[in-house]
Image (cartoon, rainbow, N blue to C red):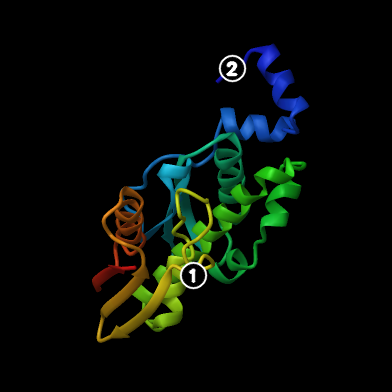
Amino acid sequence: MEIAGGAKELWKRVGYTEKVIDHFMNPRNVGEMKDADVSSTVGSVACGDMIKIFLKIDESDRIEKISFLSYGCASNIATTSVMTELVKGKSLEEAKKLSFKEIVEELGGLPAIKYHCAVLSIAGLRTAIAKYEVKKGRRPLDEDFVMTLLKGVLDPMTGRDIVSMGKVKSVSVHDGAIDIELDMSGEDEISKVIRAEILDAFEGLDVSLNVKLKS
């Protein structure tokens, strides 16, 4: 995809490098993966930052294929695009060690206000790996795992995750049944959006999910 010279210069002036612009205009590994072993969704469409990660894992526990869908800004797309390049072909253990700082460095820098996009791409990757490990019985389906997934759910009004905001009142897990109680009314649109995003976060897992909203 080509970009007008004037727009390109404007992006550079606000802190976007050539590599950021390239990954935004020509994202790598973008698109839905029909044969994925696992997928993860983190962020919030309502606040303009959401990604969905798809992984295909080979028999040696390496990332054979990775792709993504993005519902966000140029930095959201660019950071996730370069993340997929950095972990493709890597083992799951190697991929889990990737940091958001390495993504920023690979892109030649990012405006500080956009660092959260790199953090979100890492969250999407680690969440997908965690879900894969649970599906394979390598990680317990417990409260810690549930909280990991909930950290990828953002409040669309603040852009912060619902765990750090103290919105999660309680979590319990028993025989594949997950009960989540949130400190929210359940009647406003924001509560409905967050509840829907929690359901998306647990997509693909063989669990019974009950989300209660109480203020």
Near-viewer residue (92 or 96):
96
Numbered-mark total: 2
The residue carrying pointer 1 sits among few (fewer than 14), some (14 to 19) or many (20 or more) residues within 10 Å by Cα, namely few
Q: Which residue is mark 2?
A: 2
Please tell me which of labels 1 and 2 falls first in the chain: 2
Q: CA distance from mark 1 to mark 2?
A: 44 Å
Near-viewer residue (134 or 144):
144
Three-letter amino acid code at disc 1?
Answer: Gly
The residue carrying pointer 2 sits among few (fewer than 14), some (14 to 19) or many (20 or more) residues within 10 Å by Cα, namely few
The image quadrant that residue 39 belongs to is: bottom left
Near-viewer residue (63 or 109):
109
Q: Which residue is mark 1?
A: 166
Q: Residue furthest bottom?
A: 174
For image coordinates 48% across by 40% down, the residue present is 48
Q: Quadrant of the C terminus?
A: bottom left
Position of 77 with respect to 186 (left or right) is right
Q: Quadrant of the N terminus?
A: top right
CB within 8 Å, label 1 to label 2: no
Q: Of the numbered discs in the image, which one, if any, rests on residue 29?
A: none
SS state under label 2: loop
Q: Is residue 123 above or below residue 109?
A: below
For image coordinates 73% across by 40% down, the residue present is 111
Q: Is residue 8 above or below residue 122?
A: above
Position of 178 with respect to 150 (left or right) is left
Q: Is residue 21 above or below residue 84?
A: above
> Is residue 88 visible to us here?
no
Residue 101 x/y as whole percent? 72, 56
Residue 102 x/y as whole percent? 72, 55
Residue 95 x/y as whole percent? 59, 64
